[in-house]
Image (spheres, helix red, strand yellow):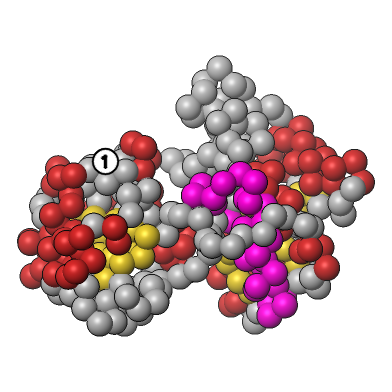
Amino acid sequence: MSQPTKLQSHHKAIILQHGGLKGRLNGKTGLSLLRYAEAEIVAVIDEESAGESLRALSGLELPREIPIVKSFADATAFGGHVLSIGVAPSGGRLPSAWLEDIRLAVRSGLHIQNGLHTRLNEDDQIRTALRPGQWVWDMRHEPPNLPVGSGAARTLACRRVLFVGTDMNVGKMTAALELDSAARRHGFRSKFIATGQTGMMISGDGVALDGVRVDYASGAIEQQVMQHGPHNELLFIEGQGSLINPASTATLPLIRGSQPTHLILVHKARMTHLKRFPHVQIPPLSEVVALNEAVARAGGAFSAAKVSAIALNSWGLNEAEAKAEATRIERETGLPCADAVRGGADRLLSTLL
């Protein structure tokens, strides 16, 4: 198997998206690929939505209408170099009903991007069907020989910007990608550090933090930061989870491993309680800011990292509503607030410089 890579501009990609188009959170990987992948997406596979409008279902401003088809056999008419699994079923395991489609894609010569816990390279039919130069990237596993965290990232000269959130799935990866793009557009040497499978599909490297044993989690992040820090002026580290979410264990190792110089707090507009735990109220944002800064500093054991700005996810609001919400949050926190997707990336970037 050759080295897996990201979706590149010369690729034609097909996204396997069964059941992940009609407002479900389990389809966010595919939707992010539609927005950020460099490749040309030629088809989306979703049995329940075949024949419908992808623009209407996704809400994305796509340059053209991309066909939704029922199966991989139907997608072959559009060509393709890579099949990306864009949906995460419950438990992150591949449903057996999808396996034959993936085997057919491999037999057809396509590379596979797989962010699920199921390891496709362990399937005998897939392994024996691989051709020279063809790869299947099982990204959700622990890299070998990981160190434990040591705080070494504090020695780097680059600015290390970690995205923290008021909850899971509020747009931390999206904000990080937008700021990385803005930084490179302004001539900075910048790198997006992916810490989840979607970011890895887009960027081509990184580490899937939820596939790493907790003892080595901060070391895994530190390894990524130490690899890319010496060659860049800015690192944008994709956040995971939230310090106030009882199911999340990811934010602390991200803080310790990256030794951030700056934090960006990401918040979904008008959200008052955690999505999965409605009994947990989101504290005032000024208190969430103080919490993340206090944890980063650890009583003075580590360098202070201030929240420089708030990245607002204003999905579902019109322009006037989004602007009013950003203004309200600025008054409440005293921090700049903008939606990076709606043109606010430059403003957020300026707070880091």
**187 relative position to 201: left or right:** right
- Residue 173 visible in image: no
**179 relative position to 303: left or right:** left
Q: Which residue is identified by label 1? A: 22
Residue at left offset 43%, top offset 54%: 140
Residue at left offset 43%, top offset 40%: 316
**253 relative position to 271: left or right:** right
Residue found at the very far top of the displayed protein: 279
Task: Locate residue 68, reporting x and y percent.
Answer: 16, 56
Q: Which residues are magenta?
A: 209-238
In the rendered image, residue 231 lying in the magenta stretch gets the answer: yes
> Which quadrant would residue 182 be assigned to in this image?
bottom right
In the rendered image, residue 54 lying in the magenta stretch gets the answer: no
Q: Is residue 236 above or below residue 188?
A: above
Task: Locate residue 146, reporting x and y percent.
Answer: 61, 60
Within-10-Å neighbours for mark 1: few <14, some 14–19, many 20+: some
- Residue 166 visible in image: yes
**288 relative position to 238: left or right:** right
Residue found at the very far right of the displayed protein: 300
Task: Locate residue 71, reporting x and y percent.
Answer: 11, 55
Amino acid under label 1?
Answer: Lys
Say which element carries label 1. loop
Between 216 and 248, the residue placed more toward the observer is: 216
Residue at left offset 32%, top offset 49%: 118
Task: Locate residue 72, reporting x and y percent.
Answer: 13, 60
